[in-house]
Each structure stands twice: as C-alpha cells, then as structure tokens.
Amino acid sequence: MVERGHQPIIDALSKYCEENYSDWELMLPKVLWADRVTVKRTTGYSPYELVYGRECLLPVEYNYSTWFTLPWKESMTTEELLVIRMKQLSEKEEFLKEASKGIINSRNKAKEYFESNHRIRSEILKPGTLVLLHNTHLLKSTANKLRNRWRGPYKILESRKNGSYILAELNGVKLRNTQPGARIKEFFQNIGRNYLNWEECGSSDSELSYHEEYDNYDE
C-alpha cells in the first residue's frame, strides 16, 4: 500500500531518472525539496510556507532579482527589523488557519463524493432483512484464499442515511460496529438445505452450531 502523497514522488523520480533507475537515491533529495515547496491543492499553501510562514527562496533568485530579494530599505533599525519578523510570524498563524479550513473542506467533499458514488445497490435494505457480512481482511490474504469470505447470517436493525447498517445476531445481540453497505449482501434461505427454522429462531443448539461453523472460518 502506498501513502497518498508518496505516489507523485515515485512518479517524479521515475520520469526524472528516465532509464537510470539506479540513481534514484541521488535524486531523492531534489524531488523531496520540490514537493515541499510546491503548493498543495488541499491547503492552498506549500508545506514550506506552512512551517516557516513565508514562501521558499529558490537558488535562482540569488542570481536574478525577484520580489523576495528586492532591497526594500537599505538601512533599518533593530526595532523595524523585529516588527517585520513579528508580522511574518503572525502571518504564519493565518496561513495555518486557512490551510486547516482547506483540508476540512477537501475531506468533506471527498466524503460526499464517496457516499454519493459508492452505493452497491439502489434500494436500501430494510430492518429485519437477513444479510451476510464480508470478511474484508481476507481480500489480500494469500493464506486464506479458500476460506469462506462471508459470515452470518445477521439481521439488520437499522439503516442509516450514509449507507451504513447496524446489524445483530439472530438472537438479538447487536454487533459492536456499524457496517458499510459495501460489505453486506442480502441472505436468501436455501429451502433444500434448511439449517434453521427462521420462524422459531432463538438460542437453540441448532443455531449455535450453525454460527460456530461460520465462526471457524475466521480462526
């Protein structure tokens, strides 16, 4: 698994090194520096500016005059210099506040997009519906490829607006965590292999043995 911010760095190294991939360690400081002085979409600021309260002075600006290197005043008193530094520090706090707002807005937009585009069904499952719960942690496990990836059945107690569900065992014991809709599917009883009499479902030995059979898949 790759961190979200690492992929652009990997891609940049790949393009910069071209076919000389063995030189990637020599180029790593350059790409890391470039990443730190580049403005991020989520915050509107570069990481450098958020840390130091001002934009980075690049090496080329020592050779060519820019806004950062222009001599505003050739002679300044200590008091004047301190005031300028204090303003820079106060501006840094404003940068951090704005960047924090940008991150929150970005996360909210991503959340709204995910919830509106990642529903696995158009119809919401109703309370009382029997469902199976997917063992998501088995997806990337090479040692468990042959194990049953579905547990249950469970009963839906409540469906929420964000597409998640509160489930319970058939005896009414509620599961601790809410489950996303992407992890559950409706359970249909196999009439030919009637393990349980759903109308008389309770804490009978047949129910316990049925659940123990499914629980053993996770051991």
Image: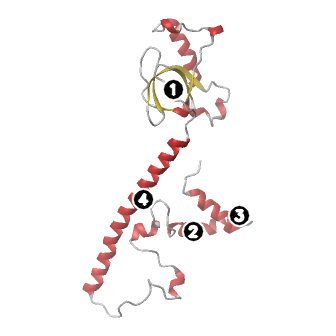
Q: In the depicted view, which residue is nearer to us: 104 or 89?
A: 104
- In the picture of the structure, the residue carrying the numbered disc 4 is 102
Q: Which mark is on residue 125? A: 1
Which numbered disc flags the more N-terminal residue, 3 or 4? Answer: 3
Reply above or below: 113 against 101: above
Asked whether the beta carbons under mark 1 and mark 2 sit within 8 Å of each other, the answer is no
Q: Which of marks 2 and 4 is in front?
A: 4
Secondary structure of the residue carrying numbered label 4: helix
How far apart marks 2 and 3 lie (CA) works out to 15 Å
Reply above or below: 120 against 197: below
Residue type highlighted by circle 1:
Leu
Q: Nearer the viewer, mark 3 or mark 1?
A: 1
Residue 5 is situated, as x and y percent measured from the top left of the image, at 54, 57
Q: Which mark is on residue 29? A: 2
- In the picture of the structure, the residue carrying the numbered disc 3 is 21
Residue type highlighted by circle 4:
Gly
Q: Give the residue at the far bottom of this rendering.
A: 74
Residue type highlighted by circle 3:
Tyr
